[in-house]
């Protein structure tokens, strides 16, 4: 677990959303990829609403969301104090303000428990610690594999939501059964949206959205394809038009159907 602040020499300053967002990240250890950008793009919120991210890390998702939708009330919970300090710095770096709390999502700090939010977002660890070889960097291992069940992530999200507020998760397809069961127990109006790395490939990531007190029927949307063409060799990292807009121009990733 990272408890001490990062030294300046141990950080890089990275651009996102076509250089609209800049975040400081550690050179070694856990570094955010495209997943927090996708998560932030998939959140349907309006200025003046409140958003909480569970396990916010260095806050790349909160920064992307706050720049895309000005006027949000942003908050994050992070287990590792070193990353929490970096999250506060990154919000400031992008002209944003928000509360970053330190603590375990299974027992959140009192200040967070006193709040309710219009939206809760999360990018939980993609692997179960007991099913993988640990990373040598402990901070990276905490971010990539956790002991906390997805059930706890979803239950905490549900408790922090306002009535009719919604939770949005991004998760690996392999953990979909666990996530789906937890969402079904705690929330309603569940939607799943698979993300294909390329046309004809199996989904690697799933976006899941559910609403507190929602009563709409379950929806499993047609997959969205991230990269153009059928291989890296033929097009490099060129994205399809929809995802070019998300990654380069900061456009929202709108779910195919609205929640009822």
Image (cartoon, rainbow, N blue to C red):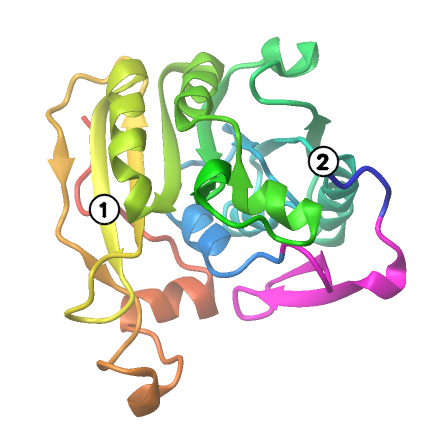
As drawn, 114 above or below 9 = above
As drawn, 52 above or below 133 = above
x and y, in percent, of residue 159 in the image = 45, 12
**Quadrant showing the N terminus:** top right
How far apart are the two marked residues, 2 and 1, measured between alpha carbons?
A: 30 Å
Q: Nearer the viewer, mark 2 or mark 1?
A: 2
x and y, in percent, of residue 140 in the image = 64, 50
The residue located at (49%, 51%) in the rendering is: 36
Was residue 70 drawn as part of the magenta stretch in this picture? Answer: no
As drawn, 112 above or below 5 = above
Is residue 71 or residue 228 the one in the foreground? Answer: 228
The boundaries of the magenta stretch are 6-30
The residue located at (89%, 56%) in the rendering is: 7
Q: Which residue is mark 1?
A: 193
x and y, in percent, of residue 135 in the image = 61, 53
Q: Is residue 59 left or right of residue 52?
A: right
Q: Is residue 116 visible?
A: yes
The residue located at (24%, 57%) in the rendering is: 203
Q: Are marks 2 and 1 in contact (CB under 8 Å)?
A: no
Q: Which residue is mark 2?
A: 80
The residue located at (52%, 60%) in the rendering is: 33
Q: In which quadrant of the rendered view does residue 226 lie?
A: bottom left
As drawn, 41 above or below 216 = below
Is residue 225 or residue 153 the one in the foreground? Answer: 153
Looking at the rendered structure, the secondary structure element under dot 2 is loop
Looking at the rendered structure, the secondary structure element under dot 1 is strand
x and y, in percent, of residue 77 in the image = 63, 29
Is residue 224 or residue 27 the one in the foreground? Answer: 27
| Disc nearer the start of the sequence (2/1) | 2
**Crowd tier of the residue under label 1, counting other residues whose Cα lies within 10 Å: few below 14, some 14–19, many 20 or above:** many
Q: Residue furthest bottom?
A: 234
- What number is the disc on residue 234? none
């Amino acid at each position: 677990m990272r408890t001490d602040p990062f030294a300046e020499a141990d950080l890089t300053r990275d651009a996102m959303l076509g250089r609209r967002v800049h975040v400081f990240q550690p050179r070694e250890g856990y570094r955010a990829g495209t997943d927090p950008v996708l998560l932030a793009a998939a959140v349907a919120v309006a200025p003046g609403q409140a958003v909480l991210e569970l396990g916010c890390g260095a806050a790349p998702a909160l920064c992307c969301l706050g720049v895309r939708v000005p006027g949000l009330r942003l908050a994050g919970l992070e287990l590792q104090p070193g990353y929490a300090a970096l999250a506060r710095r990154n919000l400031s770096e992008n002209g944003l303000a928000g509360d970053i709390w330190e603590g375990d999502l299974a027992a959140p700090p009192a200040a967070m428990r006193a709040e309710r939010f219009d939206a809760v977002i999360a990018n939980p660890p993609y692997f179960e610690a007991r099913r993988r070889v640990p990373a040598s960097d402990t901070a990276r291992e905490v971010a990539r594999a956790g002991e906390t069940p997805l059930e706890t992530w979803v239950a905490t999200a549900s408790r922090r939501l306002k009535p009719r507020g919604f939770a949005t998760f991004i998760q690996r397809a392999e953990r979909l059964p666990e996530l789906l069961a937890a969402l079904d127990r705690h929330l309603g109006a569940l939607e799943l949206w698979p993300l294909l790395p390329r046309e004809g490939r199996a989904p690697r990531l799933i976006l899941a959205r559910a609403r507190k007190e929602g009563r709409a029927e379950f929806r499993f949307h047609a997959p969205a394809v991230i990269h153009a063409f059928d291989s890296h060799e033929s097009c490099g990292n060129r994205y399809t038009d929809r995802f070019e807009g998300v990654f380069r121009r900061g456009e929202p990733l709108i779910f195919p159907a609205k929640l009822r």
